[in-house]
Image (spheres, helix red, strand yellow):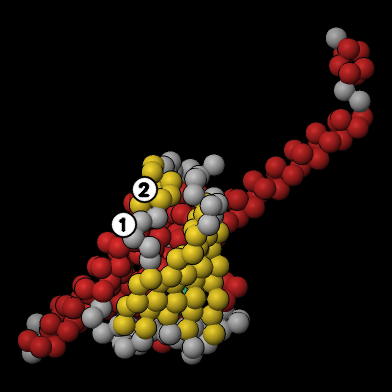
Amino acid sequence: FQGYIGSTIDIHDRKLAEERIRQSELELQEMIRREKQFVQNAAHEFRNPLAAMQGNLDILVRHPNLPRSERLDVIEEVQWETLRLSRMVNDMLMLARGDMGLEFLIEDLDLTKVLQEVWDDARASNPHHAFRWNLPEKVNLRGDAERLAQLFSELLENAVKYSPPGAAITLDLQQDAEGVTLILQDQGAGISEVDLPHVFERFYRVDKARQRSGRAEGTGLGLPIARWIVEQHGGNIELYSVLDRGTTVQVWLPRDVE
Ligand code: ADP
């Protein structure tokens, strides 16, 4: 039996097999390293809102006679931090499900209809931005409607969040036989060359202080979620930005998911 194996698996094959095993071990190690880093970052991100909540609750306990308006400020702060925490938990769960291979529900859809709902909501809640929409009446595509709406919502939320009231937010769409390209443009804060390569990393946020003062603090998970959704559809996402001038996000989606 030994002799039989020895004669059929030659040294070259064995080396190849060993190399493959080594490669998958390395990949596995890298996955574990990334997972550990994610947990570490998450714990770190939880600490700030929790500390802020605790601090504010301490104030309420220690100063029971705080004037009503000041008390309301403190309570609002706690409410804000709670909201932030729950957003973060939701985003993390979403990405964790993605890591575990969450199934997408692929069906025939009208992309215009999917995007229109998100767009109308954003317009209604941000009346001071100038929204410009250049989409065909109907765009046929196969995809997961709920996830595509979520993708667009993440991108649109950023466009609003990082641009001042009055600034224009424009959505264009180009299409050919193979797929569609969505182009979302804002005239906001932009992203520097130094930060741009990192914005798709989990928890990466540019200049936290600036965002905090503007009450626009996010989770740093929006773009990673967006990229995950695009990739699950077999598409790609690119971000172009000039600091203090604005940002353009370009998403290509194939007509049909492989
Ligand atoms: P966040 O929840 O902080 O918005 P994202 O993952 O969506 O996290 O984005 C990561 C970072 O990229 C943001 O913190 C922000 O600094 C930057 N960014 C994303 N979109 C824009 C945009 N349209 N304009 C300016 N900066 C942006």
Q: Callout 2: few (<14), some (14-19), or many (20+) C-alpha neighbours within 10 Å?
A: some
* Residue nearest the observer in this picture, 215 or 36: 215
Q: Between residues 91 and 187, which one lies in front from this camera angle?
A: 187
Taking the image as shown, residue 138 lies to the left or right of residue 226, namely: left
Whether 104 is drawn above or below 129: the answer is above
**Rendered view: 12 above or below 253:** above
77 w.r.t. 10: above or below: below
Q: Residue at x 42, y 80 (%)?
A: 186
Q: CA separation, marks 1 and 2?
A: 8 Å
Residue matched to label 2 = 109
Identify the mark at residue 139; answer none if there is no mark. none
Name the quadrant of the N terminus: top right
Confirm or reject: label 2 Cβ below 8 Å from ligand 1: no
Residue 42 can be seen, yes or no: no
Quickly name the residue at label 1: 113
Q: x, y percentage for residue 134?
A: 38, 71
- Regarding mark 1 in the picture, which secondary structure is present there? helix
Camera-nearest residue between 165 and 207: 165
Quadrant in which the C terminus is drawn: top right
- Tell me whether circle 1 and circle 2 mark residues in contact (CB < 8 Å): yes
**In the visual, does 48 lie left or right of 228?**
left
User: Is residue 134 among what the camera can see?
Assistant: yes
Q: Position of residue 49 (x, y in %)?
A: 33, 72
**Among the 4 quarters of the image, the one containing residue 158:** bottom left
Q: Amino acid at mark 2?
A: Leu
Judge whether 146 appears above or below 246 on screen.
above
SS of the residue under disc 2 = strand
